[in-house]
Amino acid sequence: MTFSSIDGVEVALREVQYLPDRGLATALFLSLALEKPLLLEGEAGVGKTEAAKALSRVLDARLIRLQCYEGLDVSHAVYEWNYSRQLLHIRAAQEGSVSEEELFGPRFLIRRPLLEAIQSDEPVVLLIDEVDRADEEFEAFLLEVLSDFQITIPEIGTIPVEGAKPHIVLTSNRTRELHDALKRRCLYHWIDHPSLGREIEIVKLRLPGVPDRLSAQATRFVQGLRRLDVAKPPGVAETLDWVGALATLGYRELDPEIVEQTLGSLLKHHEDLVALRQEPLLLLVDEARAG
């Protein structure tokens, strides 16, 4: 699927229950039009990963996800050799000689997410998730893919993209600064927490059966919570989890007692939960109910 306008991207994403702001829709449109990777940064839970998932649904493309972590290396991200199969080949050819070209050919290659995306014969959205969690050295593995859509394997040579270029989305929670060389190869967009109106709209879109009063009050409560000095402000994902929990319990509006009992859906640090008890919580509930 191709898009002729930013509006088209917005409409298509809304149809798969993802509500982007204008800036994100513009970044996604340009990434598709220019065939450039897109780097999304922002606080955890603001919808970076969901943006890539929604894009794959809109494009009817296969989502290939590489979850980054400390110590991630080429054998887990790009490729590795099937040593057991190579050994079987050697044993089967014991009476004859086995050349290095035979042992290190494509049929003995195990494709990991990056190589899988390059060699896929179907449309692909490649999600490189939380790239800031990987070691700085790992970024070097990404540069060739991001700039030339190809991978070089020493024993084989350069493997170019086989079909359409994969649509690449990288996400970062900014736990560390990414290298300029990686940023230069990408378009960039920062996803912030949504405004009150847009977050209410997101809740209604994703949880259509929830009473409007509950959606509005709960979202106002979360917005107030983000203004406090908490270790980890809740993201949109936590808002949706919490509103869903309240609706499951049968509530149609906020109540201080149930807010306190379910606060673990929003805050994941014990110190934050303790600090919010009693007066701060009551004030936030009153403000949310007053509108």
Image (spheres, helix red, strand yellow):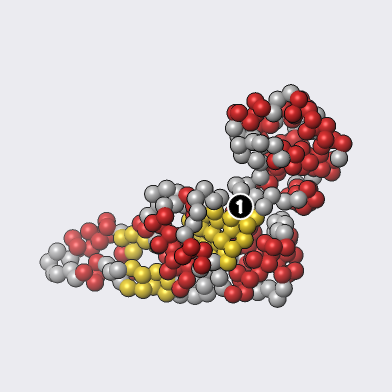
Lateral position of residue 148 relative to residue 274, left or right: left
Q: Secondary structure at mark 1?
A: strand
Q: Amino acid at mark 1?
A: Gly
Foreground of the two, 108 or 40: 40
Q: Residue at x 69, y 63 (%)?
A: 23
How far from the left and from the top, in percent, is residue 200? Answer: 78, 48
Which image quarter is the N terminus in? bottom right
Q: Residue at x 80, y 50 (%)?
A: 197
Mark 1 is surrounded, within 10 Å at the Cα level, by few (under 14), some (14 to 19) or many (20 or more) other residues, namely: some
Q: Residue at x 23, y 63 (%)?
A: 89
How far from the left and from the top, in percent, is residue 199? Answer: 75, 49
83, above or below 279, in the image: below
User: Which residue was labeled with disc 1?
Assistant: 42
Which image quarter is the C terminus in? top right
Lateral position of residue 88 relative to residue 183, left or right: left
How far from the left and from the top, in percent, is residue 211? Answer: 83, 41
89, above or below 270, in the image: below
- The number of callouts visible is 1
Which residue appears farthest toward the top when viewing the image?
278
116, above or below 130, in the image: below
How far from the left and from the top, in percent, is residue 186? Answer: 54, 66
